[in-house]
Image (cartoon, coloured by chain):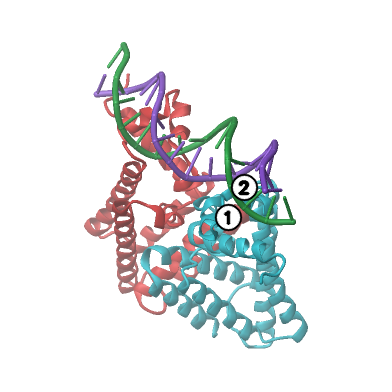
Chain colours: A red, B cyan, C purple, D green
Amino acid sequence: MKHLGDTKTEILDRAAELLQTRGYNGFSYRDISSPMGVKNAAIHYHYPSKGDLAMALVDRYTDILRGATREFMAHGGSAKKQLDNLFRFTLSECQRGRLVCPIGAFSVDFENLPQTVKAAASRFHEATMKWLIQVLEVGREQEELQFEGTPEGRALALLSSLQGARQIGRMMGMEAVSRIIKQERQALGV
Amino acid sequence: MKHLGDTKTEILDRAAELLQTRGYNGFSYRDISSPMGVKNAAIHYHYPSKGDLAMALVDRYTDILRGATREFMAHGGSAKKQLDNLFRFTLSECQRGRLVCPIGAFSVDFENLPQTVKAAASRFHEATMKWLIQVLEVGREQEELQFEGTPEGRALALLSSLQGARQIGRMMGMEAVSRIIKQERQALGV
DNA sequence: GTCTATAACGTGATAGAC
DNA sequence: GTCTATCACGTTATAGAC
């Protein structure tokens, strides 16, 4: 028996999958509804416009990130462990075919996005940076990590590298991704 | 008075601009034809299908790359100078609003691309890698550049970083891009 | 409250006018 | 040889059936 809101969740699950495999402009409501054995318009009931759906997706990613952040802040968890999780998560996502990262998903089509979604996506991106900077800062203080330059600079470099890795992975395959990640691990000592 | 083929060239120019600002799925034939004061179908005369247009774009980028490659091979040009050009070119492209790199442009929509275009895009990507690897090899031999690991690994890392930089630039602005590029320059000694 | 029928529009593409 | 009128289809979105 279905719980209340199960349908809505299933829609979001499928949307996330499609977003990360095909990008925002690469999937339609029909792509979501069809495998559910329902008409595309049914999706509009749960998410009136595609912008609403996009917003829900950003919110979901934000929640996931918030969970990781909170855990790190509260338990004073190891920075090394956090980065290890990031690397492992990125690689496993890629291996599951999710080669478009949540941040990058809206990037190509960024200009065409509704203003509200653009703002939310930017906020999410900033939150990610903030989290990563703090992890790097703490990691260096506790002598778990070594790197040159500021934590801000290092976070920026790491994030761009990971995003680029996924992008390259789409054309060059998974070995390229795992290779780049391996290098980043070595550089940081994770 | 117009030269023969001027129209065809103008179409390709506009298409390249649109491709690098909005991605492959982000522009239509109408976006090209409308500012030219002509109907969308007119474009189909010059490029029958959108796949043909995409192929022409890949060919153009390949030609540009080939020019750079040939110059490097023939004149035995400095590796440092080549990388300097790459960095400067990337930054200037971004400043002109072309935040989607030629390689990455087809990346998000890669799966939906015609087989021929996918193949051409992959070849272009491989050619880029090949060029970059050679530049790094020669540069290290001539002691112009310093880096750890293999030239292949370093090339992969550099490419992913630059692609990621552009992607991040769309959301975080140009300072992020120039900052990442500056760091890559420092790391290599360029 | 959930979904279907249908609209309104944009897309890539063809056939044929000039 | 170059472009326009037009098509078939997919898209997002609305109105209303059950």
Tell me: A166 left or right of A38.
right
Residue A29, compared with residue B147, is above or below; it is: above
Q: Which residue sits at x=65%, y=66%?
A: B61
Residue A92, compared with residue A185, is above or below; it is: above
Q: Residue B106 got which mark? A: 1
Badge 2 density bin: few <14, some 14–19, many ≥20, Cα 10 Å: some
User: Which quarter of the figure has residue A127?
Assistant: bottom left
User: Which quarter of the figure has residue A12?
Assistant: top left
Tell me: B61 left or right of A161.
right
Badge 1 density bin: few <14, some 14–19, many ≥20, Cα 10 Å: many
Q: Going from the N terminus, do you reach mark 2 or mark 1 first?
A: 1
Q: Which residue sits at x=24%, y=54%?
A: A70
Label 1 marks a residue whose chain is B
Q: Which residue sits at x=54%, y=85%?
A: B189
User: Residue A173 at what x, y percent from top left?
Assistant: 61, 53
User: Residue B81 at what x, y percent from top left?
Assistant: 62, 85
Label 2 marks a residue whose chain is B
Q: Amino acid at mark 2?
A: Leu
Q: Quick check: marks 2 and 1 in contact, CB under 8 Å? A: yes
Q: Amino acid at mark 1?
A: Phe
Q: Which residue is mark 2?
A: B113
The span from disc 2 to disc 1 (Cα, nearest Å) is 8 Å
